[in-house]
Structures are given as structure tokens and as C-alpha cells.
Amino acid sequence: MGSNSSRIGDLPKNEYLKKLSGTESISENDPFWNQLLSFSFPAPTSSELKLLEEATISVCRSLVENNPRTGNLGALIKVFLSRTKELKLSAECQNHIFIWQTHNALFIICCLLKVFICQMSEEELQLHFTYEEKSPGNYSSDSEDLLEELLCCLMQLITDIPLLDITYEISVEAISTMVVFLSCQLFHKEVLRQSISHKYLMRGPCLPYTSKLVKTLLYNFIRQEKPPPPGAHVFPQQSDGGGLLYGLASGVATGLWTVFTLGGVGSKAAASPELSSPLANQSLLLLLVLANLTDASDAPNPYRQAIMSFKNTQDSSPFPSSIPHAFQINFNSLYTALCEQQTSDQATLLLYTLLHQNSNIRTYMLARTDMENLVLPILEILYHVEERNSHHVYMALIILLILTEDDGFNRSIHEVILKNITWYSERVLTEISLGSLLILVVIRTIQYNMTRTRDKYLHTNCLAALANMSAQFRSLHQYAAQRIISLFSLLSKKHNKVLEQATQSLRGSLSSNDVPLPDYAQDLNVIEEVIRMMLEIINSCLTNSLHHNPNLVYALLYKRDLFEQFRTHPSFQDIMQNIDLVISFFSSRLLQAGAELSVERVLEIIKQGVVALPKDRLKPLADRQVDRVLACQAFVHAASGFSQFHGLSVRFASQDVCTHLSLYINLHRHHHHRYHL
């Protein structure tokens, strides 16, 4: 490298890199470092990242071989550490060149770390941090721990250096370097519970920075700061707004994000949109990694503790002494950012994490009067299910499950009236309540799943959300009511088809004892389970809010023949009593009114009949917990065969990845979502 701009093809022959990785020891005070760090580097395109790794691998291998004799890696890190001590003052004094060279030092360190972590164990990596200029194989025996010091320095840089145009890129790269540090898990089949970097982050000098780091990363996500304009610093503005190190670390972060979302090897990757804020994106990724680190053997994860306990800046109540790492943040700003960023997988995961783990956030969000700003982006994720990765769809469903646990939410969404939902293309919706739209989107997801992915647990989670809402259905849109009955019709036809296949198969088996029979009984049980859940949803609505839903009664009467076959079915007799009563009661009133009734007249008769129907004639089912629809259990079933995996939607992850990347998403700890009828 050096004072001239460097190109990827020139790196293996670069005299400064060859000297750094060579057999000659370089003192920390050598002028060589100023020469090495005076370079600019055009940001590589995504297609060039592989070329960059290939170009630098020979340099890295040489350094791995010679570093035990020279200690040059340690010297480079010490040069960087000494410069960071003056970084804050340099930012205040607008010392562009000093910040530029410090940025370049961190860039080289991160490039080297990325290769080192790929090529060796954590123990070997730590040993490379201890080598000094001595005879071969010797290393420092004093108490200084350079690896721990570097991690602490990165945390200080992220939290303490003011975010200015000239410090933007070094802030991004400090965060990216921490992501690279934590990427060791990618190269281990087993879960790292005693990782060296984890140990440093969870105790010692790094621990006091816990709450400050989490708060800074959250605010970086909230503010969505864009890269500075060209000319804001002495080194050339990168075309993608991120810099070379950002490109390198993005590769690692993308790998980690595949882990977080459990896309796994060979899984369909989501299209990466143009990043408007590399700082916000990298901050979010680092925050998610830290939050999902496994607990230490003697202490819980402090970063998860910080995420679980932070409060609103408007909350003046004192923190309990038992809550460590607590801090305050502006909930309104955080809520706005979460609403705006739900197009990305990682933002949806952050929303889930906060709703699940932080009761202060959950209470605040459920009390908002503009919940449509949050719910509509989640519904869009589900609506475009065919364009989304499976993990994104599952996270959106889990968020709906969390929200629908709250009766206040279930009531309020029917009071929010929306106009002209342009992304819903099946039908023009000029005016509809948020609750009815939610029902439409969830039912569409179920129908998509029935014809495409056929994932039992996606059905289960969708129906669980509807079941949680059903007692508070209010003023259902006529189209939403129609879709509920249409879904039941689809399930009924499927039930009849499987039943017919089972009957034919049984007859055929009488003439051929050697042919193995398909397991139609299991298919039939699954379909009947789903049908029963649908009947429970309809029954719950009729029992608790019949007078609020004339459109559902109208749809029931219009398709009354569908329910005839289930009246005497032993699996459905109990649940059919109320539905049969409603159909019989209103059918008789329509017969009394005569033939050729208009839609308006039928609805009028239904509204009059609701008043006349004694409430005590509808018998509510006994409240019960239906564990089969709990989201957490669905994931446990989906993860069967991978009992050590603690992740989300394992069905869509390849086995070799999911067996060793469990620590990042801990949805097995998910609280039991209610499904009361």
C-alpha cells in the first residue's frame, strides 16, 4: 500500500504489505507505519470481494508464518491503539489526516483478522496477539492482553468518538471489526459457550461499556445517518458510501445474518437493497449478535440484560438495584424507526426481540394510538410471502402472535379505519378496518401455504393469531367474513378428498396385502385438527360478539350447506352446537320473511335477529390452553432432529449449518402465546 492508491491486483506485490508480513521485525515507532497507512483504496464491488480475499491470502499466510518471530501483528495493533487515544481530540480539531491513517490501520487489522479467524482456532489467534520481537516461538509473559485491549478500544471508539463526517467511516469500521471478531462461531460445528471473545465482552474492562454500547447501537439504528457527501474527508469517498472495510465486514455480516435468519447453506437469500445507512445496518447486526450470545457459565449475557431492561426517557421511576446495565432511550424515536425499517429481516428480528424481551417496550407499543404504522409493514411482509424468505415470514407471524395476546390490541385494531390499501391487489379495498385487513392477510398466507409450502406449523401460527383475535372481532368487513368461510370451504373440500382417497386405498388393500398403504390417517388427522381450529374461531366470534358481526352471519347462512357434514361428525359435535344454532335460528327468520330478499334486507333481518336471540342459548366452550398452537412448540416440532438447535424455523435451514449456530436466535425461550377461546 503506501501513499498511492492501491488496486486489488497490486496487493500481493505491494512492498509495504510484503514488509509487514515478512521476516523483519518492525518497531512501533518506525516511520514505516506512517508510510503503510497513507493509502486510499477504491471500494470493491460485491464481485470483487472474492478477488480481494484471493489477493491478500498470500500476505496473510506469510504473516501467519513470520509473526511468531517478528510480532508485527502486535506492533500494528499497538500503533492503532496509540492513535485511538488521540482520536477524540483529532475529531474536535478536524485532523483529517490523523483520522484517515487510523481508519486505514483498523482496515488492515480487520482484513487480517478475517483471514486469521477463517484459518485458525481462537486459541491460536490469541497466541498471535502475544508474539513479540524475540526468538522464534517466544511470546510476551506480562499481564498485557492485547486482544482484550483491542476489543475495549473498539467499544470506546464506538461509544465515545463523536459522529462527524470525518469520523463516520471509522465508526462503521469499528463496528464491523467487532462483527468480524464475533464471527468465530461460523467456523465451529459446536456452539461456542466458552469463546475467548465472548469472555472478554462479558467481564473485565469491557463490561462497564455494556449499556453505553447497546444504547449507541440503538441510536445509530434510530438515526439512520447517511454517509458523508464527497469531499467531507481527505480520503476519496467510496462509491457505496461504506469503504473497503465495510465491504469486507459486510461479507462476514451477511454470513452471520444467514445464521441469524437460518437461511443456511443453499437457502434462498433475500435481495439486498441499497443501504442508505451502512452505520445503522452494521450497528443493528452487531446489536443482534451481542443480544444473542450464549450466557457465560457464571453470569448471564449482559447485552441481553441491557436490551431487556432499558426504559423510556420519559419514565422518571428509578431503576431497581437488581437490574444491571440499565439505561434510557427515546421510545418514540425507536418506535418510528422500527415502523420505517421493517422491509429488512434484521429490523423485524429486532422488533421481535424487543417485544419479546423488554416489557417496557411491549407496554409502550401496545398503548400507541397509531399501531397501524407498525402493523401494516408486518402485514405487507406476510402479503408478499412468495417474495420473502421463510424466516422473515415466521418472525412477522410471531410478532402478530405477541400483539394478539393483548385484548386491548385486538379491540383497537377494529376501530382503526384504513383507506385505499394499494398493495392489496386481490380486491379494491377503499375502506376497511385494520382488524379486517389483518384477517384477510393471515387467511391469504394460510391459503398460499396450503397450495405451495404446505408447512403445518405455518398453518398453526396463522390460526393461533386468528384465534387470539376471534373473541374481539368487530364489524368485520364483508370480504373478510367471506374469506373466513371460503377458507373453511377449502379445508372441507380437502377433507373430503383425503377421506375418499383413504376409503379407496382401504378397499384396494383387501386385494393386495404386499403393497404399503399411504398414511392417509395422519393426513386426515392434520386436516381435522385445522378444521376444528377454524370452527373454534368462528364459534368464539359468534359466542362473544355476534351482535357486532352481521356480515359473518350472512356468510355463514350463504354457505350453510358446508357445515352439514360436520354436525354429526364425532370430532366436531361439541364445537358445532353454537354454529348450528345460529344457522338454524337465522334461517327460520329468513324463511318467515319470504323469498327473493335483497342483501340489504337479509342484513336487516340478521341485525333484528341478533337482538331477539337469547344470549344464554349460545354456550361458551370451556377456556382451555391449546399447546399445539403455541409458537414456541411449533418451532420445537420444526426443529425435531436438531434438539441442540435454538433457532427459528429450522425446517428451512440446512442441517450442517443449524447444528452449530444455535446461539444467535434463542426463540426456544419464547413465552407461551395464549390461545383462549
Image (spheres, helix red, strand yellow):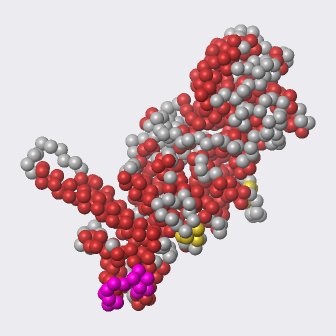
Q: Quadrant of residue 513?
A: top left
Q: Which residues are magenta?
A: 591-605
The residue at the point 83 percent across, 34 percent down is: 231
Identified at 49% across, 32% down, the residue is 189
- 251 vs 673, left or right, is right
Residue name at image x 77 percent, y 25 percent: 40
Answer left or right for 615 relative to 388: left
The reply to whether residue 452 is in sight is yes
Quadrant (top left/top right/bottom left/bottom right) for the C terminus: bottom left
Q: Is residue 606 visible?
A: no
Where residue 393 sits in the image (x, y, percent)?
50, 51
At which x and y percent is residue 555?
A: 38, 74
Dominant SS in magenta: helix
Q: Is residue 102 left or right of residue 630?
A: right
Name the residue furthest right. Answer: 93
Label total for image: 0
- Which of 669/575 is in front? 575
In the displayed structure image, the side of residue 159 where residue 519 appears, left or right:
left
Q: Is residue 19 covered in magenta?
A: no
Residue 594: in magenta span: yes
Residue 96 location, x and y as percent?
86, 32
Report the front residue among 292 and 44.
Answer: 44
State whether residue 26 is above or below residue 584: above
Residue 322's x, y, as percent? 69, 55
